[in-house]
Amino acid sequence: MKKLFIKIIKLLGFEIIDQNKFLSPTLHKELNKDLSIINEKSIVLPLGEVKITRKVNSILIIVRMNTEIEIWDQSKKRLFEQPKIEYSIRSINSLINSINFCKNKYPNLEIKTIIIDDNSSEENLNKIKKLVNNNIKIIKLEHEKFKTKIKKQKTKETFSNLASLLQSFEIGKDLGNDLIFFVEDDYLHFEPMLEEMIASYERIATQIGKDIFMCPTDYPFLYMNNEKTNVLIGNKRHWRTTNKTLCTFMTSKSLLDQYWLMFEKTCLDRHDPFEKYLNEIYLNEFCFSPLKSLSLHLTNINSSYGLSPFIDYKKLWEENK
């Protein structure tokens, strides 16, 4: 009778929780395991099940890389005070680890990665090529293409930063199909980062009934004023609403198309703040960042845009050597 009851419940699309044995007979899993099924259902104890209506089919990851400039627009040193190439290598290594972790969890999810390189030396570029091992496409920043589009800047570094951002947005617009993840090369990522972002994206977007923006980093500036926020449950952690990000974030192709003029405007001149027009989008759309952080922005230790709280910085740094 018990086996028949479980079969009937499963056919009806429900799950059973046996709190005595701490397992789900319908899922054939212990309750401390991952109970969710990508593109089908998100299950978080004790909140139950969310039927996924906003399914994720693919993700395009676009990495902006500059292995030469220590910190753009600053003279300060980064945490650990290493040459910039060391941050780029560890950042891309951590991203590759996170991609592989996600592929193991979701083998049917299409993941494509492109790196836009801004004038790396041959030595540095060879180090990156050896790391990615032909699994990730590396393309050069097309400086000349943007000279008539972007307003003349005080420094060539500022122009290059704007140009690489615009080229990344254009690639997302041309090649993106579903989710697009714009990433800078001075972030270290925890291994579950990408899996958590995708699973949380589909859960939260399903619950609120629209596409969203997501940032993988819990920035310190989020705690420097009395800003009100809403907290939602994601796949395996809480997520908070925010109206500010830097240029590492994930969104959908549909939102990129909808706000294309704002994305483009971000890159045509050096604004104050740099992300001014991105932040204006967040006045109309939901943007979420994780509690606690999934990625670490490796800037100066005193930067309000840098180190996320409650992270073992040295451990994460050493793991991605």
Image (tube, rainbow, N blue to C red):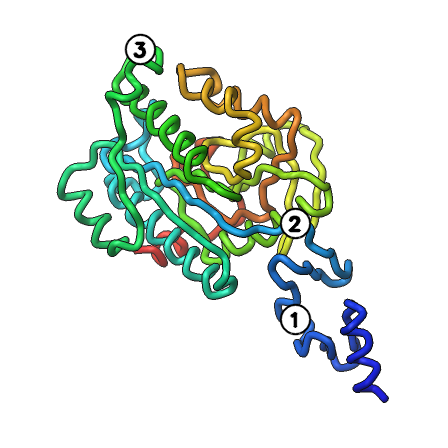
Q: Which residue is mark 3?
A: 152
Under mark 1, the amino acid is: Asn
Numbered disc in front, either 2 or 3: 3
Residue type at numbered disc 2: His
- In the displayed structure, 11 sits above or below 292; it is below
Foreground pick, 244 / 160: 160
Q: Which residue does the image show at 42% across and 44% down from the upper left?
A: 61
Q: Earlier in the sequence, mark 2 or mark 1?
A: 1
* SS at circle 3: loop
Q: Residue at x 29, y 40 (%)?
A: 81
**Residue nearest the observer in this picture, 272 or 102:** 102
Which three-letter amino acid code belongs to the residue tagged 3?
Answer: Lys
Separation of residues labelled 2 and 1 (CA atoms): 17 Å
Quarter of the image where the C terminus is located: bottom left
- Position of 27 with respect to 251 (left or right) is right
Q: Residues within 10 Å of mark 1 (few under 14, many from 20)?
A: few
Q: Residue at x 42, y 39 (%)?
A: 175
* Quarter occupied by the N terminus: bottom right
